[in-house]
Image (cartoon, grey):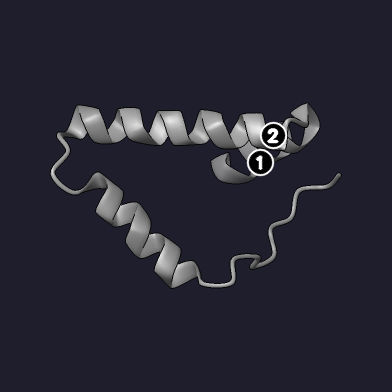
């Protein structure tokens, strides 16, 4: 499965608002921990090492 980088969320602005709300009231460390947990949960959901490596390369570019 190739990495899908095309817009794919039906309501990206709505999700972004939810993501911001999830961080409200958190300290910097708590916010970073939330992001790390979210990333690991999504990586587990994807479950394809090559897709994840491609995503890492895309994010680092």
Left or right relative to 25: residue 15: right
Residue in view at x 42 percent, y 71 percent: 13
Left or right relative to 34: residue 54: right
From the image, tell me which residue sits under label 2: 52
Distance in Å between CA atoms under marks 2 and 1? 5 Å
Task: For the C terminus, give its image quadrant.
Answer: top right
Where, by quadrant of the figure, is residue 7 drawn? Answer: bottom right
How crowded pointer 1 is (Cα within 10 Å; few <14, some 14-19, many 20+) is rated as some
Q: Determine whether the residue tagged by mark 1 lies in a helix, strand or loop.
A: helix
From the image, tell me which residue sits under label 1: 55
Q: Are marks 2 and 1 in contact (CB under 8 Å)?
A: yes
How crowded pointer 2 is (Cα within 10 Å; few <14, some 14-19, many 20+) is rated as some
> How many numbered marks, from 0 up?
2
In the rendered view, tell whether residue 38 sits above or below residue 24. Answer: above
Q: Nearer the viewer, residue 24 or 53?
A: 24
Where, by quadrant of the figure, is residue 10 drawn? Answer: bottom right
In the rendered view, tell whether residue 29 sits above or below residue 10. Answer: above
Left or right relative to 33: residue 28: left
Q: Residue 30 location, x and y as percent?
A: 23, 30
Left or right relative to 60: residue 8: right
Q: Residue 19 location, x and y as percent?
A: 36, 53
Using the image, tell me which numbered label, if any, was put on residue 38: none
Q: Residue 40 location, x and y as percent?
A: 53, 28
Residue in view at x 17 percent, y 38 percent: 26
Task: For the N terminus, give its image quadrant.
Answer: top right
């Amino acid at each position: 499965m190739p990495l899908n980088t095309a817009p794919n969320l039906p309501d990206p602005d709505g999700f972004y608002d939810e993501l911001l709300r999830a961080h409200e009231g958190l300290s910097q460390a708590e916010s970073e921990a939330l992001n790390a947990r979210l990333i690991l949960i999504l990586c587990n959901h994807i479950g394809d090492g090559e897709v994840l490596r491609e995503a890492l390369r895309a994010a680092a570019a």
